[in-house]
Image (cartoon, grey):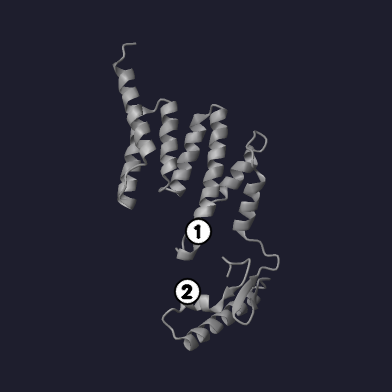
Amino acid sequence: MLHHRAGFVRKVELLEHFWPESNPKDGLSQLYSTIYQIRKTLKSIHCPIKIVNSENAYRLDLNGALLDVDEWESKMKRMSLVTKEAFPDFKQALDLYKGDYFEKDDFWWTETEQNRLRLLWLDYVKRLADFFIFEEDNIEAIMLYLRAQKVHPFEEDIYFMLMQLYDTVGERDSVIREYKHLKEMLQEEFGSLPSEHIQKWYQNWEKRTLFNQSTPS
């Protein structure tokens, strides 16, 4: 209900999610008992959140209670442009993101929202990294992408950005290491190879690197 806080959630949908093996009568009994316990708990801790009942559905009324995900997204969307003045607030907003939405619970029905929020965060990571690159501070950009990689180790584009940044600062071994890690990750997790444009970039980079090494100074 928190996930669908903008509207009602049908009771039959709740039964399908949480008591799929029960017959309708027993399932409804468990649902009503669960809702009663939730209401009792909310009341005992003086929480303003209410569960609103309709004939066939429930809705969560937040009654002014704030959600971290809503506050975070609102803050992010207010900061569209990275400047030196806005940098501290921008970085603070990025720091509030600790991982995927409902990450520890692994609910399949949160995947769409997880992906949306992850892409929003990664978009702002790229904006901040572009700011560092514009300021000719590639090391800070690298540190930012390394942090993003720890949060989202399966995002191929993060590896690619690190490869390009390491190339910019002349860290040849680091380019090789990132490409190797990318190949290993994709093979282990998805049974696939890096995207074609990344493979071509790396092949061209290898040729260029070998040429530069063989060219007399």
Question: Helix or strand or loop: what does disc 2 sit on?
Answer: helix
Whether residue 41 is visible, yes or no, is no
Whether residue 214 is visible, yes or no, is yes
Instruction: Look at the image and tell me in which quarter the N terminus lies.
Output: bottom right
Q: Nearer the viewer, residue 138 or 202?
A: 202
Instruction: Look at the image and tell me in which quarter the C terminus lies.
Output: top left
State the CA–CA distance, disc 1 to disc 2. 17 Å
Three-letter amino acid code at the position of disc 1: Thr
Q: Residues within 10 Å of mark 2 (few under 14, many from 20)?
A: few
Q: Residue at x 57, y 46 (%)?
A: 94
Q: Residue at x 49, y 88 (%)?
A: 25
Three-letter amino acid code at the position of disc 2: His
Residue 17 circle label: 2
In this picture, is 217 found above or below 193?
Answer: above
Q: Position of residue 19 (x, y in %)?
A: 45, 79
Q: Position of residue 9 (x, y in %)?
A: 58, 73
Q: Residue at x 66, y 68 (%)?
A: 62
| Residue reaching furthest to the right | 64
Q: Nearer the viewer, residue 113 or 185?
A: 113
In this picture, is 217 found above or below 9?
Answer: above
Q: Residue at x 41, y 44 (%)?
A: 156
Q: Earlier in the sequence, mark 1 or mark 2?
A: 2
